Image (tube, helix red, strand yellow):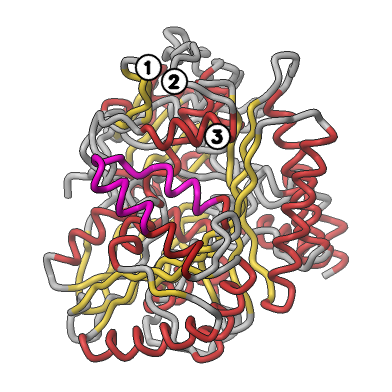
Amino acid sequence: MKSSIPKRRQELINWSGWGYRDSKFYVKNRKLVFSGSRYSIKNDIALTRFERWNKKVFNLTPNDPFEKPKLPTTFPEPILNETFYNTIKDIKMDYSVDGEDRFIRCHGQTIHDIYNIRTNNFKRIPDLILWPKCHDDVVKIVKLADENNVMLIPFGGGTSVSGSITCPQDEERSIVVIDTSQMNRLLWLDKENLVACFESGIVGQDLERTLKDEGLTMGHEPDSIEFSTLGGWIATRASGMKKNVYGNIEDIVIRVKMVTCKGVLERNISAPRVSCGPDFNQLILGSEGTLGVVTEVIVKVRPLPAVKKYGSIVFPNFEMGVRCLREIAKKRCQPASIRLMDNEQFHFGQSLKVDNGLVSKFVDSLKMFLLSKVKGYDLMKISVATLLFEGDKEEVEKQEKLIYEIADRYSGLKAGETNGQKGYLLTFVIAYIRDLGVNFGMIAESFETSVAWSKCELLYKNVINCVHAQCKKHGIVYYLISCRITQIYDVGACVYFYFGFRWNSDCIDPIGLYEEIENKARDEILASGGSISHHHGIGKIRAKWYEQSVSTIGVNLYKTIKQELDPKNIFALKNLHKEEDKINFKKLKAKF
């Protein structure tokens, strides 16, 4: 299959930020506009509401000057292991030592990564890029790397927001990236049992397009589905927007094949469920590239839904919305997706609407009038949920009726299908806004957690108050902290925060300041009963909390598995545990 993402990623993908090169927020004739036709925001139409929102929240105006980032023209010289490099050439493996190819694969999508690539601040980038075409190619690469003590980094879509694929800056060995983008085939499909086997490098949008041609879907739809890969979902233990119907990635996967330095790790049976000791699939899920390279995955698939319908609900405040979602979870009647925005995020979403003349303005004003004057809702407190229903017609109708009945008990008002669809699709545009912010002297990022229902409201308030206090402490005047609930479970929910600020002219290290504030917020999350991460993973930026989350013996168990599968630390990404390359294995062996 021809991948949606070419080998020369920079021809299609923005090298200095998120997404496609032809899609971005930018200033045209002193007006904020969005380019491209890939998304629901109209191309080159002045976003006057967005301008007003930016002026109010961040004191930004479109005519503020900024310097566009420029792709470097010189790059660090590659450190090549001659034996490894010559053998790669001998076996006719696709490779590149081109500076651009290496540079754009030295990082993921954390704000730290974006700042460093824009300032050309990476001292260490990959030395060699390889494009294997199949499982056997990966076996050859890993064996050769182990024999020659070459470090390997598995690379899928490059969308990591945990620092997991960022090049270790102190690595002295030759660093080789295994770009899995050419391993993107559907190997086989079993329509009778509704299972399929894909190579790990397939991009989410290509996977779904392939299945759609067969009248099927896998249903895993993370915010990054346009760019992230099946292998990346496995590595991070990912979650999708429609997990209520299709499950998280661990619910979808039946069998995983991973190449390690000791050989191929794979369960030799694909039955729906087995009881044969610890599940090795779970060992691979969330391993973040530190144990080996995922090459092939057998997954569950489902028939395409007959009906796909959006919806939305307005609540008087965020707390009432949370309680409604809790009741929906109790009844186990949640739709494919249900997301709840707090008031800050609601107003942010409204700002991205396009003013379509006097009629459109009148209709919007009338809606706000009805909410505030007739229903008595405070527009500075309201919260909005967006919904997506999928299934048979009768099933969807029954689900809609029950959910809106529950919402009514929590003062929730049905707000229409159009608002629900716009809110759902807005998810794919939000990431582009961060790049606009960086151009104007802003730092913005998201972080997420999962928490029990009984602690959900308190965690929300504690984290919001923590960020307010930190901004006051550091003299930050213009900033935004907002929240939404993105996934719900029987016992709790995923809570997603967005934080951004405009730094002062005397701020020497804005990235360091952001990380200091987010770390305080993360401490507050853990103190309030939240997890270290719901679906972004640990990577490098959350490694300091790993032991606190899984216990000392849990960390030691991971290290022991690491030593067994990768004794030379070939996959030395330093994810999960920040000092995995300094493990005292004799001491660990004695403990176990």
**How many other residues sit within 10 Å of disc 2, few (<14), some (14-19) or many (≥20)?**
some
161 on left or right of 140: right
Magenta segment: 345-366
Residue 245 lies in quadrant: bottom left
* Residue that extends furthest to the front in the rendered view of this protein: 373
Distance Cα–Cα, label 1 vs label 3? 50 Å
Could you tell me which secondary element the residue under label 2 belongs to?
Answer: loop
Give the alpha-carbon distance from disc 3 to disc 2, as whole Å.
48 Å
**Cβ atoms at labels 1 and 2 below 8 Å apart:** yes
Q: Earlier in the sequence, mark 1 or mark 3?
A: 1
Location of residue 287 (image quadrant): bottom right
Instruction: Please indicate, yes or no, whether residue 255 appears anywhere in the rendered image.
Output: no
Task: Work out which residue is located at the far top of the displayed protein and give it.
Answer: 74
Q: Where residue 132 sits: x, y (%)? A: 32, 43
Q: Which residue is mark 3?
A: 150
Please tell me the numbered disc located at residue 30: 1
Quick check: is 349 in the magenta stretch? yes
Q: x%, y% of residue 286?
A: 56, 61
Callout 1, which amino acid? Arg
Q: Nearer the viewer, residue 122 or 518?
A: 518
Does residue 412 appear in the picture of this structure?
Answer: yes
Going from N to C along the chain, the mark reached first, 1 or 2, is 1
- Left or right, residue 230 beside residue 210: right
Residue found 72% across the figure and 30% down from its top: 477
In the image, residue 253 above or below residue 578: below
Residue 62 numbered tag: 2
Say whether residue 539 is left or right of residue 275.
right
